[in-house]
Amino acid sequence: MLDKHQGARLANLWDDGKAAGMTEPEKLLYRSNLLGSDKRITNYGGGNTSAKVMEKDPLTGEIVEVLWVKGSGGDVGTIKMDGFSTLYMDKLRALKGIYRGVEFEDEMVGYLPHCTFNLNPRAASIDTPLHAYVPKPHVDHMHPDAIIAIAASKNSRELTSKIFGDEIGWLPWKRPGYELGLWLEKFCQENPDARGVVLESHGLFTWGDTAKEAYETTIEIINRAIAWFETENTGPAFGGRSKPVLAAADRAAIAKKLMPVIRGLISAGESKVGHFDDSQAVLDFVTSTSLEPLAALGTSCPDHFLRTKIRPLVVDFDPAQPDVGNTLAGLPEAIATYRADYAAYYERCKRADSPAMRDPNAVVYLVPGVGMITFAKDKATARISAEFYVNAINVMRGASGVSTYVGLPEQEAFDIEYWLLEEAKLQRMPKPKSLAGRIALVTGGAGGIGKATANRLMQEGACVVLADIDETALEAAQTELSTRYGKDFVRSVNMNVTSEAAVESGFGDALLAFGGLDILVSNAGLATSAAVEDTTLGLWNKNMDILATGYFLVSREAFRIFRNQKAGGNVVFVASKNGLAASPGASAYCTAKAAEIHLARCLALEGASAQIRVNVVNPDAVLRGSKIWTGEWKEQRAAAYKMDVDELEAHYRERSMLKLSVFPEDIAEAIYFLASDMSAKSTGNIVNVDAGNAQSFTR
């Protein structure tokens, strides 16, 4: 039975008022964004749209027919005008004259750049011929769950005819490419009244004479499929439930324990970032009687398959007896077995010119009663992979409810995964940034040094968890950084570093968000000033609680995660020049900062055997952007040096050997160095970033 979300009809979002006055390319963009706004229509990056438009040739001045089609690697939901390829239709038709047959169809991709209109640099996709050869001005190719559920059924041709009659045709499985474009053209010529076609194991093509007609046909056909399933697929999902669903808090607790261990086992060649999904569709699947047999079949749609691999790994966990200890103990063997099975699949299916075997680890991990964990090179890819597998779950749910679900044949799946054209696309991707796949937690992350550090680490591709006690500043910092780098790369947790429970909870949230931890930047702090005789026990304890105990608590939690991951780790303390050089009227602060430095030395000693590095950055007088320097500390330090507050920055600058002010970005640069592989052979070290202060020399 379809769940409520699946059963809901798609809304017709076309607005004649908005479309009025748009050019045909603008209507194509409008239509594309509407279609891509609902994952039930197509998944991220999946499907494509096109329009054939009459335009003036910039060279001859003649009016020519131009194909506008989503370019390679784009996403219809977020595409802009520059995301479309533009090609001369007469040249695309001329390609038929040089086509040498299906054995040589891949070479046709190399001819597509010769068809480019107006020097458009956007690369054309492999699906370009499918759009070009449909004799209609507007064409949509989508991957709707409800349609793929038909396409992936054993009797998909029969079901297509039963649901749509002659309006929608059916074509057998064929890998996307030039030959399929010719098949589609032939179908249209032989069935001039058809409004679209279902591609076996793949998706839906629809078309129209106007942009609006094409859009509304796509919506109508998908809604008819949804309605049919609603009537016909009335039994329990996946044969019914065979395992209990754990409570939400228990599901999260299990995921927090599993994710860093899995991550450590699969990140030897490339750091991975995780994503956890316990949506209702996932829970229905991972508690069902059909979980293991259906999971073993893999996905059907090529787009699903490329994102989720040949098949998922079903984790050996019994939600009826939720002791995760045995599961954790069994993970190394389970993951090793998956890798061996993947290598065997590669050996069975490889061809003479196949690329070398890629990462043999699973992308999708299904945990009975708990949910789905996905791991990929970055958070966005892990999240999107999960979305694709949810699409696949919806497809399996529909197909197995009305027929027999059929996955992509193994050799076909391999030929897509190791397609030379796909390999060429992978080789063109930019080199990963230095911290790609790394996960950092920064305490005091909403302040000057903390936010600058998060920004620097994110510049290099890291995912960052901002931890701070100031909720308003935390929200502002997350908004700023997510706007700059994308929402996938940053999370925030409200964390009082002096609270053991808050620290454990905050680190747990980080694990659930990203799947593990690589870098801890312990930066949360305060500063106080008072003569020793005026220093109260409360003031003394406050410094010790935040600057010593707080650093201990967050380090202890990071060490626990690092040891569970078994993949090393990196801790950077933000201490102070005052930890090495005494200052007047600040005995509590200076003593606590000295404790930080010595704690770092102790941790470096303890962590070395597990490849956990611990280093210290000592700033001095970082006034700009600092929450510490906006409070009493600034006035107190000015009083200690018997000067006005406005003179303080110049005082610190002139006191330095280099006569320079120190800014948050300077500290962030040193932290990045210590957190990166550039300092891979350094631990127990102190880097002073104070513009030079002889008193704080470490030797």
Image (cartoon, rainbow, N blue to C red):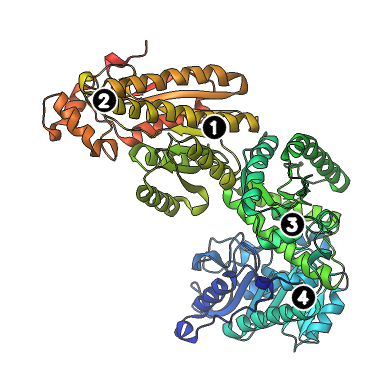
Checking the image for residue 398, the label placed there is none
Checking the image for residue 305, the label placed there is 3
Kind of residue at badge 3: Phe
Between 556 and 221, the one lying in front of the other is 556
Kind of residue at badge 1: Glu
Is 471 on the left-hand or right-hand side of 516? Answer: left
Q: Secondary structure at mark 1?
A: helix
Q: Secondary structure at mark 2?
A: loop
Residue 653 is situated, as x and y percent measured from the top left of the image, at 21, 27
Residue 54 is situated, as x and y percent measured from the top left of the image, at 55, 81
Q: Residue furthest bottom?
A: 193
Q: Secondary structure at mark 4?
A: strand
Q: Is residue 210 above or below residue 450?
A: below
Kind of residue at badge 2: Thr
Look at mark 2 in the image and give the residue it sits on.
536
Q: Residue furthest front?
A: 537
Residue 17 image-quadrant placement? bottom left
Is 120 on the left-hand or right-hand side of 564? Answer: left
Look at mark 1 in the image and give the residue it sits on.
557
C-alpha distance separating marks 4 and 2: 78 Å
Task: From the image, state whether disc 2 or disc 1 is nearer to you.
Answer: 2
Between 648 and 421, the one lying in front of the other is 648
Kind of residue at badge 4: Val
Residue at 65% in and 59% down: 279
Look at mark 4 in the image and give the residue it sits on.
198
Residue 64 is situated, as x and y percent measured from the top left of the image, at 56, 79
First-in-chain label (4 vs 1): 4
